[in-house]
């Protein structure tokens, strides 16, 4: 293999695929970056057997072929190369890859490219196309609610349900639940229910940063999901297991509805949370006062001090005082986009719901905590 | 104590003095930030018994007095306050400090301000005044050469020598030596030899960031040094011990002198160092070729690969091939400001000197390493 390509394009590709390279590889090859040169394109790959990424760039290909290189040094070297162009040439005899640019001349030991577990671009049982900005929003408004506890892997993923034109993302750590739905303009030919690891969704969200909306092709099978857009292909294994019937935990109606300015409420919760998170249970108390038309947000820690802040609100229904894990309120508010919001409550020990006004497709339900105070 | 001050000024002061607050305090009070309100000024202090910082801001002082607060929460809270102004009020009965700003109302448990080890502003044996940009340069061009090995504390400091109008900074880790001198416009009344911890010098360098040169008053005693400028006072204990006679290790003359473009040489060394630092000894080889008028910088690692790069140079004296710890060359070049430089050499196993052309006040000497190749 011998190719000449633009340094910045190579670097962009390296940065992207290296996210799928194993940090603690089961086999040395899983720490490699794989390059395949064919026609006028070089495809770079990273693959750790859980997720696999590919990224294609244009290049002058003098000799087609493929190579596998240790990812770590390769990326560092390309970052510092002096020229605008980079030449990569495989020296079969010495099993070296020569990287030259301007006055710089590097060679890196190569690995066995023939043995590299290349990323498989499978057919899948179901496919659909979605705009990247829509997909980004579906991910952003749900994935934050996933668990990070690896001992219950099921909850480290998002339940993704496709039912013809209906798309539903749901995430829960069993204490809070985020659900976001979307109606596809072109319906998918069938139905599927998957649990997609939060990790691939977060990487995908980061990768989908175009200013102009683009199409993302999603391919689903019984054990994997893949995303294709522009010069990128991302694939991931699915999580195994049965996601709980989350619809059961969404209360059908509420006694008290509190209308708030999202930003005022968010900023006050964030401040009071500074004290909450100094204690083990990270608790904030919300005293919704129907008569005063305000909510008093407070938190106390015997060893540090306390905080309280009052935010105006408009209430329907009786006053109520309720306590939550501050994180579960703060996380949701960070992902709210509407100017106004509604906090829906029943009893101090039953689940509450936070609504972005005017966005019925998004549901957030959170369980309160019992406090001694 | 009760004061009203600008949030941003308070935050600036907190960020500064918190650098002197102990992370693992010997006594709880050393994790505190101390505030003293008097006249129209609030002085904030951080002190960990090794270094002590004070920073004064203007404030409306309703009730003078002093308080001590846990640094960590105090700074986080002020960062997030909603208003432009902050009110700090001491509640003696409950031993609380109330922090209010806009709708936010915090209270933090206070510590015993009377027991706080306030920063001492001692008289000292010797004083001098120096411009901040000059001091910054003296620090920058020497401190990087200090050791970070705490088992030999002497070398974690800079030798600072004041001899009437002559000021000399020297730092070494025994493998490399950086010396920088300056002639004071107004001479100090006497002489002193101190070993100043690199830590205080680096904090000082960072603090001295004014665009317009300002005066820094330096006060030296047998066991401490302090710096005063604008609204800031910084003090530090000195290191104990006898600094080696470093002048001995500076070779008086050289057989080979190599003239190089600083930036070309620096960039090439940095690139080749990528391979060098993948191995235990971090070695780069420099082959200065008098006939070709170039230096070949190279490094090899059996497990990774290799790098080489040629940089043009103009040589006086014979060719020489010599090897160094890549870090000791790179660190110096990063702090060179001149366009051109001279690499002065004798034998492959004797100390070399790097000179910034036209800057005789700065000396950098480095010991080569023996290689098998």
Image (cartoon, coloured by chain):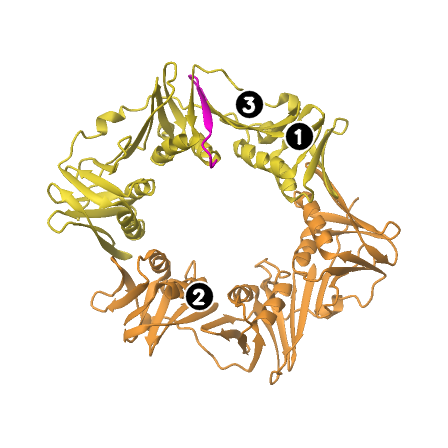
Chain colours: A orange, B yellow
User: Residue beneath label 3, please?
Assistant: B119
Which quadrant of the view contains residue B192? Answer: top left
Dot 2: few (<14), some (14–19), or many (≥20) neighbours within 10 Å? many
Which mark is drawn over residue B59? 1
How far is disc 3 from disc 2 in space, using C-alphas?
55 Å
User: In this picture, which residue range is highlighted in magenta?
Assistant: B209-225
Note whether residue A197 is visible. Answer: yes
Q: Are marks 2 and 1 on the same chain?
A: no
Relative image position of residue A293 (x, y in whole percent): 85, 52
Task: From this view, report whether residue B333 is shown above or below residue A110.
Answer: above
Dot 1: few (<14), some (14–19), or many (≥20) neighbours within 10 Å? many
* Mark 1 or 3: the one toward you: 1
**Between residues A75 and A100, which one lies in front from this camera angle?**
A100
Q: Secondary structure at mark 2?
A: loop
Relative image position of residue A273 (x, y in whole percent): 68, 47
Which mark is drawn over residue A48? 2
Q: Secondary structure at mark 3?
A: loop
As drawn, is B86 to the left or to the right of B245?
Answer: right
Q: Are marks 1 and 3 on the same chain?
A: yes
Which quadrant of the view contains residue B205? Answer: top left
Q: Is residue A306 magenta?
A: no
How far is disc 1 from disc 3 in space, using C-alphas?
21 Å
**Between residues B127 and A88, which one lies in front from this camera angle?**
B127
């Amino acid at each position: 293999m011998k190719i000449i390509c633009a340094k910045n394009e190579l670097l962009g590709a390296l940065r992207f695929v290296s996210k799928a390279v194993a940090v603690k590889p089961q086999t040395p090859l899983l720490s490699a970056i794989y390059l395949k040169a064919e026609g006028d394109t070089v495809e770079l790959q990273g693959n750790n057997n859980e997720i696999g990424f590919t990224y294609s760039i244009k290049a002058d290909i003098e000799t087609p072929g493929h190579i596998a290189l240790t990812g770590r040094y390769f990326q560092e070297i390309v970052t510092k190369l002096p020229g605008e162009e980079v030449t990569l040439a495989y020296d079969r005899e010495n099993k070296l890859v020569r990287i030259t640019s301007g006055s710089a001349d590097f060679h890196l030991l190569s690995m066995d490219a023939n043995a590299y577990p290349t990323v498989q671009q499978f057919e899948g049982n179901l496919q659909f196309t979605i705009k990247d900005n829509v997909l980004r929003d579906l991910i952003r408004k749900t994935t934050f609610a996933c668990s990070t506890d690896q001992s219950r892997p099921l909850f480290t993923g998002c339940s993704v349900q496709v039912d013809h034109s209906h798309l539903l993302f749901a995430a829960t750590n069993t204490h809070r639940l985020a659900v976001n739905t979307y109606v596809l303009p072109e319906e998918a030919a069938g139905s599927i229910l998957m649990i997609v690891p939060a990790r691939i969704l977060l990487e995908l969200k980061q990768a989908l940063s175009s200013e102009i909306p683009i199409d993302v092709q999603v391919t689903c099978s019984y054990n994997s999901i893949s995303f294709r857009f522009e010069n990128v292909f991302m694939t991931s294994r699915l999580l195994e297991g049965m996601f709980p019937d989350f619809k059961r935990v969404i209360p059908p109606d509420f006694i008290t509805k509190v209308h708030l300015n999202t930003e005022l409420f968010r900023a006050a919760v964030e401040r009071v949370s500074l004290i909450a998170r100094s204690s083990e249970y990270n608790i904030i108390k919300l005293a919704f006062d129907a008569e005063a038309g305000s909510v008093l947000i407070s938190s106390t820690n015997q060893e540090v001090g306390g905080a309280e802040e009052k935010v105006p609100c408009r209430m329907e229904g009786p006053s109520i005082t309720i306590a939550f894990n501050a994180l579960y309120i703060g996380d949701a508010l960070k992902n709210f986009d509407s100017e106004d919001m509604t906090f829906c409550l029943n009893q101090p020990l039953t689940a509450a719901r936070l609504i972005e006004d005017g966005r019925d497709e998004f549901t957030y339900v959170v369980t309160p905590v019992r406090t001694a105070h």
